[in-house]
Image (spheres, helix red, strand yellow):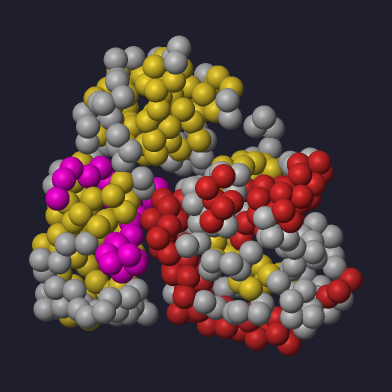
Amino acid sequence: MADKPHQNLAIIGHVDHGKSTLVGRLLFETGSVPEHIIEQHREEAASKGKSGFEFAYVMDNLAEERERGVTIDIAHQRFDTDKYYFTIVDTPGHRDFVKNMITGASQADHAILVVAADDGVAPQTREHVFLARTLGIETLIIAVNKMDVVDYSEDTYKQVKEEVQQLLGQVRFDSDDARFIPISAFEGDNISEHSDNMSWFDGPTVLEALNNLPEPSPPTDAPLRIPIQDVYTISGIGTVPVGRVETGVVKKGDNVVFMPSDAGGEVKTIEMHHEEVGEAGPGDNIGFNVRGVGKDDIRRGDVCGPADDPPSVAKTFKAQIVVMQHPSVITAGYTPVIHAHTSQVACTFESIDQKLDPSSGEVAEENPDFIKAGDAAVVTLRPQKPLSIEPSSEIAELGSFAIRDMGQTIAAGKVLEVYE
């Protein structure tokens, strides 16, 4: 199973730009979904008057999602290329699901940004690029989708590419790293084979670009940290917390503790992709059972770590943030919701310590009265209830967060220091 290096891939972009269709197409082209399943979905899609949704249906296999025609949960799916095996973290595009997007994108090593050729950069394209940048996505592949809709026009492709490059420049995403590929997920152009419809394009196909991604360096030297996504009760086993190992290694027999709940015990079993394993490392999505820990002892948002090196719990923390959007200004006393790894906690801005020049990172002003959209700043935040978070310099995977209020992402940031 682990004969190839593993990569977690997020698929991001604006709603209706074709993310689910691309995912379904990737799974189909790599043989991860058999032809007859696609055929089944095709008939079902047609019967609901949603012809053309068959690839999207591969991912959206929750009945409710089909009825609504939207992607809700983060579905994990795997597929293999010649070089890697990928777990797709399918990130929802709808506005009210940006919270999932934040906890989803933070689990990915790389991302494919899907931008529809007939629509260009849309509001969520901006938001997702910004989050990907802040949450440490290393490489971005940009798939300019729906080329079939614009008659495979090279001019339209160039226009969209320029728009996206401007956006990447604004958030200082290294756009040399960004590989642009014109595709049609629906028709299958430039996914696994070069398309005759776009002979003007001589770059890689999507699968080639995925094969060319750099290998993620596994952060095994950091202590074990597993943010908990869900807690299940499974008959015959008991309480099973589920999460992704961000750093370190967990083995059967280890003594672990969940913070801030402060429950702990010995790891009895670890399961991955429905198979029992002896240990798990960074990037592995696992379910595990801990002796003596019941369903009511722990919850989503807890972080599991070694009993002798427990995850830190912040009384207050200092962070560097960038404000993406806010209708007015942010001052001390403002209390939005912080989304960090799988946790969501209201936090109060205790003080705004420094305003930074966003282009250089130099201090522009000490103790400013307020900050507004477009500003970068160093702030001190006080969680309203215990929050397990780590300094970004020590455990980057648990050091980034998004700030949300009024149904939108206000700012994103990284933790500089934690005061326990």
- Is residue 292 found left or right of 248 in the rendered image? left
- Is residue 48 found left or right of 282 in the rendered image? right
| Looking at the image, residue 245 lies above or below residue 75 | above
Asked whether residue 109 is in view, the answer is no
Picture coordinates of residue 363, whole percent (x, y)? 23, 76
Is 210 in front, or is 405? 405
Q: Residue farthest to the top?
A: 236
Q: Which residues are magenta?
A: 384-410
State the image quarter where residue 360 is shown: bottom left
Quadrant assignment for the C terminus = top left
- Is residue 297 found left or right of 60 in the rendered image? left
- Residue 386 drawn in magenta: yes
State the image quarter where residue 83 is shown: top right
| Looking at the image, residue 121 lies above or below residue 341 | below
Residue shown at 36%/45% (left/top)? 342
Picture coordinates of residue 262, whole percent (x, y)? 21, 29
Figure label count: 0
Quadrant assignment for the N terminus = top right
Picture coordinates of residue 372, whole percent (x, y)? 24, 79
- Is residue 86 found left or right of 28 in the rendered image? left
Residue shown at 16%/78% (left/top)? 370
Is 351 in front, or is 90? 90
| Looking at the image, residue 236 lies above or below residue 407 | above
Asked whether residue 345 is in view, the answer is yes
Picture coordinates of residue 214, whole percent (x, y)? 62, 54
Residue shown at 49%/31% (left/top)? 286
Residue shown at 66%/80% (left/top)? 118
- Residue 11 drawn in magenta: no
